[in-house]
Amino acid sequence: MTRLRPPASTTYGLDNLPYGVYSVPGQTPRVATRVGGQVIDLTLLLGEDVFARPSLNAFMAQGHQRWAQVRARLREAVSGDVPDPAVHDLADVTLHLPFEVTDYVDFYASEHHAANLGRLFRPDSAEPLLPNWKHMPVGYHGRTASIVVSGTDIVRPHGQRLPADAPAGSRPAPEFGPTRRLDVEAELGFVVGVGNPLGEPIGVTEAERHIFGVVLFNDWSARDIQAWEYVPLGPHLGKSFASTVSAWVVPMEALQAARVPTPTQEPGVLPYLALAEPWGLDIAVEIEWNGQVVSRPPYAAMYWSPAQMLAHLTANGAPTRTGDLFASGTISGPEREQRGAFVELTWGGTEPVEVAGEPRTFVEDGDEVVLRATAPGSDGGRIGFGEARGRILPAR
Amino acid sequence: MTRLRPPASTTYGLDNLPYGVYSVPGQTPRVATRVGGQVIDLTLLLGEDVFARPSLNAFMAQGHQRWAQVRARLREAVSGDVPDPAVHDLADVTLHLPFEVTDYVDFYASEHHAANLGRLFRPDSAEPLLPNWKHMPVGYHGRTASIVVSGTDIVRPHGQRLPADAPAGSRPAPEFGPTRRLDVEAELGFVVGVGNPLGEPIGVTEAERHIFGVVLFNDWSARDIQAWEYVPLGPHLGKSFASTVSAWVVPMEALQAARVPTPTQEPGVLPYLALAEPWGLDIAVEIEWNGQVVSRPPYAAMYWSPAQMLAHLTANGAPTRTGDLFASGTISGPEREQRGAFVELTWGGTEPVEVAGEPRTFVEDGDEVVLRATAPGSDGGRIGFGEARGRILPAR
């Protein structure tokens, strides 16, 4: 037996206890938690078969009462003597995509991000926000098959894009080639543990019982492909080549101390979107580009909350299922160094940032981008979200 | 043993042999084919466990050589003596969603549909088609969880929409309520049998080995919800409440006699979309509204082919999997009575059609809409696609 002794400064203490899926050579993947720098096998720790699986879906489907019970048992179990075979150093394991993604919606919930993109892409318009933006969390569906776990390399995608040197006002034919404007979007993703049947929306006050936890999410974006394709049906191949999620799902219950009011919503929202309790999240995100932190987007500045996103997503009776993922959209704060996408940070590529001494605009081959985040925990310290890491390989 | 004796006029003869999933009371769903008005259990007929499952996915994943081998064996087996317990009358079985949908993309492949919508929604523009339309099959992702099998009732969805009586040019606040402009979209859906790994696109000449078969697809659409939400990220809740697929998947191999050239593509397409063989499909679709056929959209008029859609969908390296579904978008021909959506057929609701003696524009509570289709078969007759049937229940 082992007594876990995480350092006092850890962001993976007893107030975090995230869930992930790990394997060691010769063993099939199964569910674990993380304490300090160690990964703890939950099948061995708690003696339950629901964790002897390659995804969290079976456990998540058991519902929010079970989530609370298991979390309480887990907190007790990792405080006592832990069976040696259950404990691995993080460096010795492979981490896998922690859940099977059944449907995926990406929202657009940051007012600063939406307004920045409006100014960049509709410079002649007096209103940076579109008319619907303050009335609903605008979102769209994306591809589930291309959601990959942190650490997966990202191949620069090909696609249709207009020639770089096309004269303004001309109508050039598109070319097909590797994207020239590869970007990141720093987001959080929310994982549905228990869904809703067809025709029965999830009320905004019921969201707590449906949302299992939170992941980091990098919605890699090829801006030139996206710009050419997206009217009128929205983004498709500019996004669908890959999205990176963190390997750890932080349970909503670990985020009680991070709950804050969302910014005032004016004009007032329709009743089906009206919050009864604070659903904002004081989560500090950072974007590291080739080892240098270039932006610190504050999640607390997000206009639309996850409860509102889920209520909107199902308001027409659309069903969700265990493993549904909805992401926040790019997190951008009011300041330049809080912008969550490089197209904003470098203002469409016109205002480079210095990365390791070089002026940079979009992501280049060989670059590595890592998202990280922390939030206040319940024990006075902070809790961590792992990382969403991706390195860019040249186009094939 | 039984000798099947389908009538000579059947559209479910030996040149069709579609795949579906059925159950009878007390038995779990499993795979079957249809001959005439009878459903034949494939586990009992062929003695293979891969069919003793509630979806086609395991069989589809075995690849196109297996599809051909099984089809040949099936044709032989249903021509001879068939074990009695394998045979059920269609009226005695329940048909289920035939495959597990892993990702879903809806395209926009009809030039007549895209041009009609351009004229309806952008009347001031000289060009009904947007600049990208002739260069790529434009498409977007949709929700897989709300794809239901033919016969499932459709509840009129709620959503945000602008007030019906808002003065032109005003900026009214949206209301939340049941859609007032519920519409259909007559489409075909293409089912991916074998997908592609992340980063390895499916070439347009390789599509044959990946596309398993074809279903009817009704992409129910709430036009008022869609109109308010869709800029800039595309359709979402105006579509995600439900889509109806037929219970039978017609194998691509059954459609050899239906293969025709697609319309001339001018300007020429980029090399990754260039077809080496005819990929158009001469499939005659019809839309029945409360028992009356109101439109006969010709699939042969579609501008973009399924091979091009699949090549485009994966051109950026996006992976597909067994059970991926991509739909064609509304099928509309050049004539009024060939339009595949009621918003086109009634020109935005301004030119009602007569249905059972009443002038009608959009779909009302209690209405039933059925899609059907036939194509030339290899034995000189025609083959059928079952139906995509849905009845509208009032909003809850």
Image: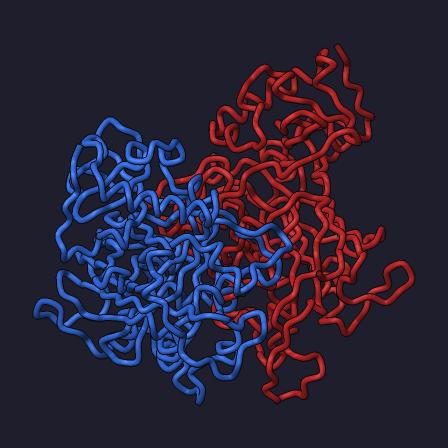
Chain colours: A blue, B red
Image quarter hosting the N terminus of chain A: top left
The residue positioned farthest toward the right in the image shown = B357
Count the marks: how many? 0
Q: In this view, does B7 lie to the left or right of B137?
A: right
Residue A35 is situated, as x and y percent measured from the top left of the image, at: 21, 47
Q: Is residue B376 left or right of residue A237?
A: right
The quarter holding residue B336 reads bottom right
Q: Nearer the viewer, residue A307 or A111?
A: A307
Residue B389 visible to the viewer: yes
Q: Which of B308 and A94 is in front in this view?
A: A94
Q: Which of B301 and B194 is in front in this view?
A: B194
Q: Residue at x 53, y 45 (%)?
A: B325
Q: Which residue is drawn at 77% across and 13% down?
A: B2
Q: In this view, does A242 lie to the left or right of B21?
A: left
Q: In this view, does B48 lie to the left or right of A118?
A: right
Q: Nearer the viewer, residue A323 or B19?
A: A323
* Residue A86, above or below A200: above
Residue B107 is situated, as x and y percent measured from the top left of the image, at: 54, 55
Q: Which residue is drawn at 45% across and 54% down?
A: A104
Residue B274 visible to the viewer: no
The quarter holding residue B109 reads bottom right
The residue positioned farthest toward the left in the image shown = A357
Q: Which residue is drawn at 48% across and 47% down?
A: A63
Residue A53 is situated, as x and y percent measured from the top left of the image, at: 37, 34
Residue A249 is situated, as x and y percent measured from the top left of the image, at: 33, 51
